[in-house]
Image (cartoon, rainbow, N blue to C red):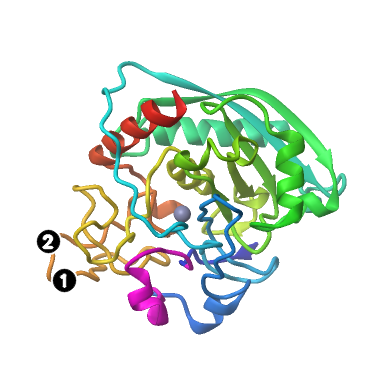
Amino acid sequence: MRSRTRFLMAFGLAVAAFAGLSIAPAAASQADLHRGGGLCSALPLAGQNTFGLATVARGGSAARGEPGSMSGDGAFVAAPRGKKLTGVVTIPVHFHVLRAGSSYAQGNVKESTVKRQLDVLNRAFAGGYGGAAMPFRFELVSLDYTTNAEWFEMGYGTPAEREAKTALHRGGAGALNVYSGTAGANLGWATWPWMQKEHPEWDGIVIDFDSMPGGEIEGFNLGHTATHEAGHWVGLYHTFQGGCSNSGDGVADTPREFVPTSGCPAGKDTCTRHEGVDPIHNYMDYSTDPCYPEFSQVQVDRMNGFWELYRS
Ligand SMILES: [Zn+2]
């Protein structure tokens, strides 16, 4: 079993303020932090904001962290006002398996694993593990396999990422393209809805194939890396966005949080002057998969506006 801890590496804005100490006090050891590349190396694909999860050297232990700065252009994007979505919105999913060969270790995941991943995504967005229900459901409409060692190992912001996405991306702004591979040194990353127009072919999420249900990354193999990335894809920030500042993550019902969570530390509270303990159980923190049962009601509202403006 590979092991990792989810920890942060990227975040914007206010972050600069504590960039020097952007380490979850609750967990990530120094060793974790540097594994897989260390802190936020912001090298955004032009116009592509990301966040991914863990930084890890394969076979080693690491943490959920993300490539690139969460802030990208540095501006906090407030949720647009939008009509409340009624009923269920079905999102077509184009799933692209990138592999280096025919073995599992080479990323050759089974179709049944992809389907289980979609089941987890659907259950999470339906509030099936707890928390609020999102109006979105995901339907697998295409699944393709590409054998290309470079694409399989593509990292954030690399030419390989651009090539793979340009070649494989399908559908419009409302279709979710998922790429499974090693996700470079991360657990995954995503593009923001407001970046879609500029580079529609780069839109989508990238996940470590081993983070899918039944994968081998200890603590991160229930499939919630995809849940977290899909959350970004519809417009959600991390719960620790903005630290203890007023804007925070733009979501009123997720208590402010200074630093990301590593593991699942009950009672963690990094903004003690503000109400509520850290939202460690929210999918948009960096906690481990078993620690993740929920989206919040106001996150649902935030997604609504983004969907209407950018993806509907
Ligand atoms: Zn993230």
Q: Residue shown at 34%/35% (left/top)? A: 303
Few, some or many residues within 10 Å of mark 1 (<14, 14–19, 20+):
some
The stretch in magenta equals 9-26
Q: Compared with residue 50, is residue 145 higher up or lower down, i.e. above or below? A: above
How many numbered tags mark residues here?
2
Q: Decide which of 150, 194 is in the foreground and name it.
A: 194
Residue at mark 2: 275
Q: Is residue 26 visible?
A: no
Residue at mark 1: 272
Q: Amino acid at mark 1?
A: Thr
Instruction: Give the image location of residue 155, x and y in percent.
Output: 68, 58
Choose top left, top right, bottom left or bottom right for residue 213: top right
The quadrant of the picture occupied by the C terminus is: top left
Q: State the residue lying farthest toward the top.
A: 87
Q: Is 104 in the magenta?
A: no
Q: Is 19 in the magenta?
A: yes
The quadrant of the picture occupied by the N terminus is: bottom right
Q: Residue shown at 84%/48% (left/top)? A: 103
Instruction: Give the image location of residue 96, x and y in percent.
Output: 71, 36
